[in-house]
Amino acid sequence: RLSRRRATTFVVPVEDVTGLHVHTEQQSAARLLEAYEDFKPADLAEAITDLTPKRRLEVAAAVDDERLADVIEELPEDAQIEILASLETDRAADVLEAMQPDDAADLLSELPEEQQEQLLMLMEPDEAADLRRLLAYDENTAGGLMTTEPVILGPEASIAEALAVVRREELPTALATTVFVTRGPHETPTGRYLGMVHIQRLLREPPHASIGGILDRDVDPLEPTAQLGEVARRLANYNMIALPVVDEGGHLLGAVTVDDVLDHILPDHWRTDRHEILPGVSHG
């Protein structure tokens, strides 16, 4: 018969015990990030919104630039500004570069002009140029809503090439639905806009065919001055995920996606009031 020796119990004063209260800021942030490792950016943003401001800034300091950029895009405006203000200026510029251009421009527009310029001067010239163009438009217009980095290819590109581009993991889902086709150059502002190709059409065509032969030319591009209401109506009328924005010369400036429109037409507090039923929205 097996027996187990009874353990001896000692009682000691709590002040004689070491290690119970060792809790550095770095350890705290590291443990939080371990718990949130598999979270999507929107879920991580929701989680850190519920933290105290001190813990939220600890997490922001510990996470890498790319992930922090993704999370900031999902945060309420006041939390975005709070986190950006807590970063060293050089790092703040790096995080803005890693954000989607339209989201970065929205955040910059909330800062004083002097701070805007300081951050833009620290960024790569091409990235800063994109943001300066976006900042020139009112935020409730197609120009203010658009991203300057949609998927753009020339008409000679093959369907196989287009599919390889849209399946890139880092590409936001809304942008992966559409390839915009232009003459060179293919960086915004591009050469003349020719049309768009939808991912469903790409999946139905032979891989060796060129995308120039399957263009959708029936959807009229938006002007950069088109107002938010017009943009929303056009997306709804055409059942589109993304629409092109072109200038007077027909050059592609960017694309507006449905998620950017939703961010602007939902109530300002929709991120923080996530457990409440929004007006006109049923949970049934």
Image: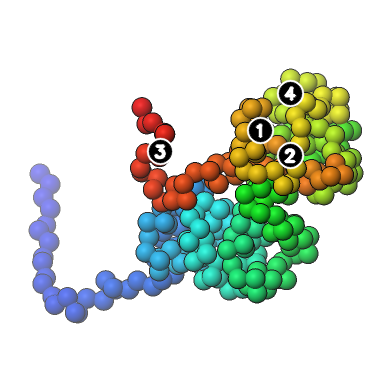
- Kindly identify the amino acid type of the residue bearing the numbered disc 4: Arg
Contact between marks 4 and 3 (CB within 8 A): the answer is: no
Q: Is residue 252 left or right of residue 84?
A: right
Q: Which residue in the structure is indicated by mark 1?
A: 234
Q: Earlier in the sequence, mark 3 or mark 2?
A: 2
Circle 2 or circle 4, nearest the eye: 2
Image point (49%, 66%), residue name: 82
Q: CA distance from mark 1 to mark 2?
A: 9 Å
Q: Pointer 3: what residue? A: 279
Q: Earlier in the sequence, mark 1 or mark 2?
A: 2
Q: CA distance from mark 1 to mark 4?
A: 21 Å
Q: Dot 3: within a 10 Å radius of its alpha carbon, few (fewer than 14), some, or many (20 or more) residues?
A: few
Gap in angstroms between the C-alphas marked 1 and 3: 23 Å
Q: Where's residue 178, x and y in %?
A: 71, 34
Say which quadrant the N terminus sits in: top left
Q: In which image quadrant can residue 194 be found? A: top right
Label 3 to label 2, Cα distance in Å? 29 Å
Estimate how packed mark 4 is, as few (under 14), some (14 to 19) or many (20 or more) residues with alpha carbons within 10 Å. Answer: some
For badge 1, the amino acid type reads: Arg
In the displayed structure image, the side of residue 56 where residue 110 appears, left or right: right
Structural distance between the alpha carbons of marks 2 and 4 = 22 Å
Seen as rendered, the residue at the extreme bottom is: 16
Q: Residue at x 52, y 61 (%)?
A: 80
Kindly identify which numbered label has been placed on residue 201.
4
Name the element at disc 4: helix
Of the two numbered discs 2 and 4 on the same chain, state the one appearing first in sequence: 4
Residue 152 on image: x %, y %: 79, 41
Front one among 201 and 130: 130
Q: Position of residue 193 (x, y in %)?
A: 84, 38
Q: Amino acid at mark 2?
A: Leu
Give the percent coordinates (x, y) of residue 7. Answer: 12, 61
